[in-house]
Image (cartoon, rainbow, N blue to C red):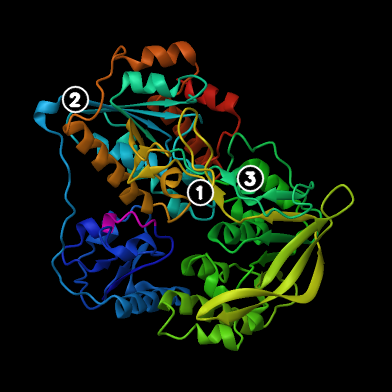
């Protein structure tokens, strides 16, 4: 028997660390890890010990004997990976870990943010002797996109928060939620109270299409829709028009597929998850029967992963329709899709889309349309979105590189709801340099640098999406944060950090500026009440979405 990694996989490599025979790859110190969709277990090396099953924080590992038919493609994914990256040795080289010198004294670090990158940083720091950590987040609740970004029908993925508790709840860590840097405390004050500050604030803004009509009512960033149905306090009061039968999603990433799934899934099935109550109420009244997911290029260039694509085809009573596949896979495109050029995961993605195209439709079903080679040109309507215009494109082989070439075919598609899912970008952080073109804090391996001189700013670090851009999955942030923490500890041990000169008790400053802060124990009260409410409703949790309700719950005895 062999074990198989299935969707959802968080890529945090907990399974790699416990595998006694090094059969799970790519490991964090291997180059493919940075771009891998998931991890893979080598069937020839696995000894069926089950250690990986126990270690996986999201229950994504299954016995090969227990795979459902719809999970069989995961076996093929693993086989394809090891054909491309055969194992060269069964001896794992553990990455070096930089320790704090006993002569250096205690290290005080502020971590701004409490999403995956911030939590992994706090976990790493609290496992090192002599480190004290203050975690600060402007929201009343922790975990960032794990709470407010992961789709509610992916409850297993959200389970990664269980391992984050060890960092946030550590005896040498203190949490200050509902506290905003730049309003309640400044960057200078953080540095005055700490040897170093790690900014792990994510990438909260959506990229624009930059086309006419983009800002008409009825056109929204998909990030806002995701935050709305997940109960993010900043977005709970938004409204979306579900009165028409068609919605259009611009983008070909995992977020686009998440949004499409939510729009067509039976609301009674969603009501079994932790989706926000206001979202369930609105989706129960939805008239949407068709969701068109639009990509400028073809399936080989799509950013969504194979696991997410497979999940799309498993929604009950929903057809998957494919449009524009011929243009995407014309003679020029096919020339670039042979095994000598394209990774197996990309070939598998194309194969899966082609299989969708062969499926016969079922009368009465809702449908998701995967539309390729369509360039959005304009949104039009009288006071609000009523249609979107596309320019059909074709892919051509330009000296071995696939390029998009416009055609003369323009099409207008009626719709009252457009969700733009063309990527995230970071926002500037007060008093820090910012690379506006890339949407990140300029840095070298996590050390924030002066954009003019290139010199590191003493005591200032970054991790996660605001460090590297919106790439990777949840577990990718573990390696990213470990790199930053290692460099921070190295700088501290080498005497390159400035000793804090302000009073040691950072809490006095915060409690004066923001009496309504929420600490970890107060968050546990919120968590306990949300899960209790969920138990009564036979759901994982029922969230509080208003800040006032969260504050009230945090103070409950």
Q: Are marks 2 and 1 in contact (CB under 8 Å)?
A: no
Choose mark 2 or mark 1, whichever is in front.
Answer: 1
Q: Residue furthest right?
A: 382
Label placed on residue 224: 3
Q: Residue 105 location in percent, x, y?
A: 15, 24
- Residues 35 and 516: in front is 35
- Residues 326 and 66: in front is 326
Inter-mark Cα distance, 3 to 1: 21 Å
Instruction: Answer few, some or many: residues within 10 Å of disc 3's Cα (few below 14, many 20 plus, some between 14 and 19).
Output: many
Secondary structure of the residue carrying numbered label 3: helix
Q: Main secondary structure of the magenta part?
A: loop
Question: Is 199 one of the magenta-colored residues?
Answer: no
- Residues 16 and 31: in front is 31
Q: Using the image, determine if residue 448 lies above or below residue 79.
A: above
| Residue at the disc numbered 1 | 438
Query: How many marks on residues?
Result: 3
| Residue at the disc numbered 2 | 106
Choose mark 2 or mark 3, whichever is in front.
Answer: 2
Inter-mark Cα distance, 2 to 3: 41 Å
The range drawn in magenta is: 10-15
Q: Is 149 left, or right, of 343 in this rendering?
A: right
């Amino acid at each position: 028997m062999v074990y198989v990694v299935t969707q959802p996989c968080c890529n945090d490599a907990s399974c790699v660390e416990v595998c006694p025979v090094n059969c799970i790859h790519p490991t964090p110190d291997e180059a493919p890890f940075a771009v891998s969709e998931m991890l893979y277990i080598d069937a020839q090396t696995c000894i069926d010990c089950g250690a990986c099953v126990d270690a996986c924080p999201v229950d994504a590992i299954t016995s090969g004997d227990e795979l459902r038919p719809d999970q069989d493609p995961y076996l093929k994914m693993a086989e394809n990976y090891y054909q491309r990256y055969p194992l060269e040795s069964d001896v794992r080289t553990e990455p070096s870990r930089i320790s704090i010198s006993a002569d250096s004294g205690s290290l005080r670090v502020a971590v701004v943010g409490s999403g995956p990158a911030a939590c992994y940083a706090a976990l790493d720091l609290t496992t090192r002797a002599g480190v004290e950590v203050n975690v600060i987040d402007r929201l009343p609740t922790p975990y960032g996109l794990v709470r407010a970004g992961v789709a509610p029908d992916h409850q297993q993925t959200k389970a990664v928060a269980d391992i984050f508790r060890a960092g946030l709840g550590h005896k040498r860590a203190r949490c200050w939620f509902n506290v905003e840097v730049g309003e309640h405390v400044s960057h200078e004050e953080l540095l005055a109270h700490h040897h170093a500050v790690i900014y792990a604030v994510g990438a909260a803004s959506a990229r624009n299409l930059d086309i006419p009509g983009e800002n008409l009512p009825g056109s929204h960033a998909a990030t806002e829709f995701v935050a709305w149905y997940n109960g993010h306090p900043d977005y709970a009061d938004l409204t979306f028009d579900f009165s028409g039968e068609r919605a259009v999603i611009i983008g070909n990433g995992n977020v686009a597929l998440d949004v499409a799934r939510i729009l067509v899934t039976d609301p009674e099935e969603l009501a079994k998850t932790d989706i926000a109550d206001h979202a369930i109420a609105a989706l129960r009244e939805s008239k949407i029967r068709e969701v068109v997911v639009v990509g400028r290029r073809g399936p080989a260039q799509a950013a969504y992963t194979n696991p997410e694509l497979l999940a799309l085809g498993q929604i009950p009573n929903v057809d998957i329709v494919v449009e524009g596949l011929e243009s995407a896979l014309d003679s020029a495109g096919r020339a670039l899709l042979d095994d000598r050029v394209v990774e197996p995961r990309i070939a598998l993605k194309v194969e899966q889309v082609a299989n969708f195209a062969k499926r016969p439709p079922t009368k009465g079903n809702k449908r998701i349309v995967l539309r390729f080679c369509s360039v959005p040109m304009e949104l039009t309507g009288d006071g609000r979105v009523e249609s979107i215009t596309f320019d059909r494109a074709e892919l051509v082989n330009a000296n071995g590189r696939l390029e998009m070439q416009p055609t003369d075919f323009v099409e207008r598609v009626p719709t009252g709801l457009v969700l733009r899912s063309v990527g995230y970008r970071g926002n500037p952080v007060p008093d820090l340099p910012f690379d506006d073109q890339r949407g990140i804090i300029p840095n070298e391996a996590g050390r924030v640098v002066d954009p003019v001189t290139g010199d590191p700013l003493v005591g200032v670090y970054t991790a996660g999406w605001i460090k590297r851009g919106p790439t990777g999955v949840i577990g990718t942030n573990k390696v990213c944060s470990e790199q930053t923490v290692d460099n921070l500890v190295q700088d501290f041990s080498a005497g390159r950090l400035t000793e804090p000169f302000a009073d040691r008790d950072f809490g006095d400053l915060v409690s004066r500026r923001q009496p309504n802060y929420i600490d970890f124990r107060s968050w546990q009260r919120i968590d306990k009440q949300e899960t209790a409410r969920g138990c009564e409703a036979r759901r994982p949790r029922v969230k509080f979405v208003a800040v006032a309700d969260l504050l009230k719950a945090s103070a409950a005895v």
